[in-house]
Amino acid sequence: MNRAQKIALFNLIVLTIGLALALVLVIAEIFEQLAGFVVVGTGIVVVISGLFFRKKAGKVDFDERDYLIRERAWFVAVASSYGCFGGNGIYQYFKVGPDGLVPMGTLLGMFISALITLVFMKSFATLLLYAKGFKHGKW
C-alpha cells in the first residue's frame, strides 16, 4: 500500500469507529453532549492523519497515476458533499416549511454531515480507484 491508500484506510477506520461510538452515545441517551466531542475528536484525528504516514526520504511518493486518482477522488467527494448538504437543506425546507425557522444546531449538523461525507467519500473513492487498477482516462 502506498501513502495515499494508508491515509484513506486510516480515515475510513477512524470515521467508522468515531461515528459508531457517537451513535451509541446518542441512542443510549447517557452522554449526548459527549457524542459531539467524539465527532469533533474524530474530525481532528482525520485532519492530522497525514502526519501519521510520512513520506519516506529518497523515494518517489506521488506520480501521474496517483495525481489522477486523487483528482477523481476529490471530484466524487465534493459532489457527494454538495449532495449531502443540498439534501439536508431540502429536508429542512419540507420539515419546517418556507416560513419556519431552523435552529442553529441543525445548521451546524448540516455542515458537519457534509464534511464527514467529504472525508468518507474521498477515502472510499481513493481505495476503490486503486483497487480497480485505475487507468488513465477511465473510471
Image: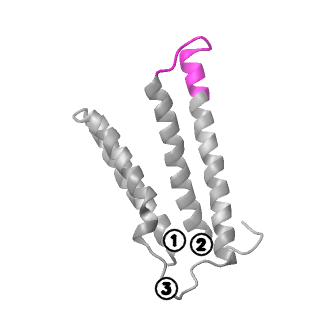
Labelled disc at residue 57: 3
Residue pushed farthest left? 30
Of the image marks 3 and 1, the number of the one nearer the N terminus: 1
Q: Does 129 sit left or right of 45 as displayed? A: right
Q: Is residue 120 above or below residue 6?
A: above
Q: Element type at marker 3?
A: loop
Query: Where in the figure is residue 65, as x and y percent of width and height?
Result: 68, 76
Which residue reaches farthest bottom?
Answer: 58
| Mark 1 or mark 2, whichever is nearer to me | 1
Separation of marks 1 and 2 at Cα, in angstroms: 8 Å
Mark 1 surroundings: few (<14), some (14-19) or many (≥20) residues within 10 A: some
Amino acid at circle 2: Tyr
Kindly identify which numbered label has been placed on residue 65: none
- Residue 45 among magenta residues: no
Q: Nearer the viewer, residue 108 or 124?
A: 108
The magenta region covers: 90-103
Classify the position of the C terminus by image quarter.
bottom right
Give amino acid for label 1.
Answer: Gln
Please give the residue where the numbered disc 1 appears in the rendered image.
Answer: 5
Q: Are marks 2 and 3 in contact (CB under 8 Å)?
A: no
* Residue that mark 2 sits on: 130
From the top left corner, tell me how far across and down residue 132 is, in percent.
63, 72
Please name the residue shown 52% across and 15% down the image.
101
Furthest residue in direction right, as rendered:
137
- At label 2, counting other C-alpha atoms closer than 10 Å, the crowd grade (few under 14, some 14-19, many 20 or more) is some
Q: CA distance from mark 2 to mark 3?
A: 23 Å
In terms of depth relative to the viewer, which is nearer, 58 or 32? 58
Asked whether 93 falls inside the magenta stretch, the response is yes
- Extreme residue in the top direction: 99
Image quadrant assignment for residue 134: bottom right
